[in-house]
DNA sequence: TACTCATGTAATAATTTTATTACAGGTGTA
DNA sequence: TACACCTGTAATAAAATTATTACATGAGTA
């Protein structure tokens, strides 16, 4: 994974700027988990967890896969994608060129 | 500057997860500016700019100093502090221990 | 069949963040 | 004095994010 635009950098930063989402990365780094399992471990509801997972997945920091357990249940397992990014003023300066300032609504 | 806790990491990420704030870092990296000057360059109002500057300053990414110009006016110049941080799952995993999950209101 | 545990989403509420408007004070210059 | 340009903040509005509640579906097991 490499950051190739300011907009993508922002998306990554955004996806990481929440305590639960950092915690999710932390947990999944140790071991992949399925959704309900993660929700219990974090002590939050699934709807809320889905929201956080979605944001992390959109930033490409985690990914989910369906898997059928021995008991025949379909579970969605999440794991972290490996990433390593550096943040410093120079890098931000370079990427700022490809950064959209005002969130303009997208057309169809 | 080094990230020594999950809470501080979050504060830094939070302060950077906004297009204007990234842009501010980018501009100040090239040259320090005073508040009104920055506001004009960004095309935003000073009150809004103050808000963004405050968040960056709280995360210790920029700093402001008063300076009296030749014409005798007091201006507040901002500049970026140098920083360089690495973000990867392992690091997040380590810092997650010192991460506060629920934002608990502070007592007086 | 009823229960458990997995999946997911729609609708709404609460909270935080972002943005604007309206002030007020200070200094130098025409 | 009036104007231009600097500083700053209080109050409010708008928008986005976060969180909750209520549903609905499917598969295995008692």
Image: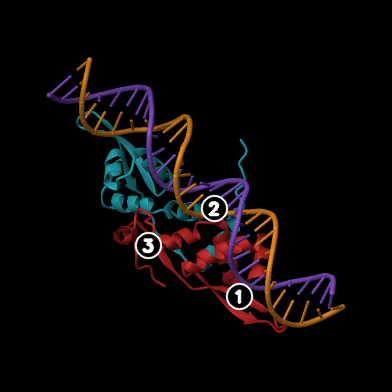
Chain colours: A cyan, B red, C orange, D purple
Name the mark on residue B107: 3
In the image, A35 versus A58, the foreground residue is A35
> What's the chain of the residue with tag 1?
B
**Total numbered labels:** 3
Viewed as shown, does residue B70 lie left or right of A26? Answer: right
- Quarter of the N terminus of chain B within the rendering: bottom left
Which residue in the protein does label 2 denote? A7
Residue receiving disc 1: B77
Q: CA distance from mark 2 to mark 1?
A: 28 Å
* Discs 3 and 2 lie in a common subunit: no
Residue B84: quadrant of the picture:
bottom left
Disc 3 to disc 2, C-alpha distance: 38 Å
Query: What is the chain letter for disc 3?
Result: B
Q: Is residue A32 above or below residue D2?
A: above
Distance, label 1 to label 3, CA atoms, is: 34 Å
Q: Could you tell me if residue B19 is visible in this image?
A: yes
Res B106 → quadrant: bottom left
Residue at 29%, 45% in the rendered image: A43
The percent position of residue A69, horizontal first and vertical second, equals 23, 33
Where, by quadrant of the figure, is residue D8 drawn?
bottom right
Q: Provide the chain ID for the residue under circle 2.
A: A
x, y percent for residue A45: 34, 40
State which mark lies toward you, 1 or 3.
Answer: 3
Find numbered disc 2 in the image and state the secondary structure of the residue it sits on.
Answer: helix
Image point (62%, 38%), residue name: A107
């Amino acid at each position: 994974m490499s950051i190739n635009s300011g907009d993508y950098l922002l998306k990554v930063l955004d996806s990481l700027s929440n305590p639960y989402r950092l915690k999710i990365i932390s947990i999944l780094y140790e071991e992949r988990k399925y959704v309900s399992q993660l929700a219990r471990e974090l002590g939050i509801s699934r709807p809320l967890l889905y929201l956080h997972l979605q944001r992390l997945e959109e930033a490409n920091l985690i990914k989910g896969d369906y898997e059928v357990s021995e008991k025949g249940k379909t579970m969605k397992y999440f794991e972290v994608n490996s990433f390593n990014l550096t943040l410093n003023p120079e890098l931000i300066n370079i990427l700022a060129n490809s950064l959209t300032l005002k969130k303009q609504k997208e057309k169809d």
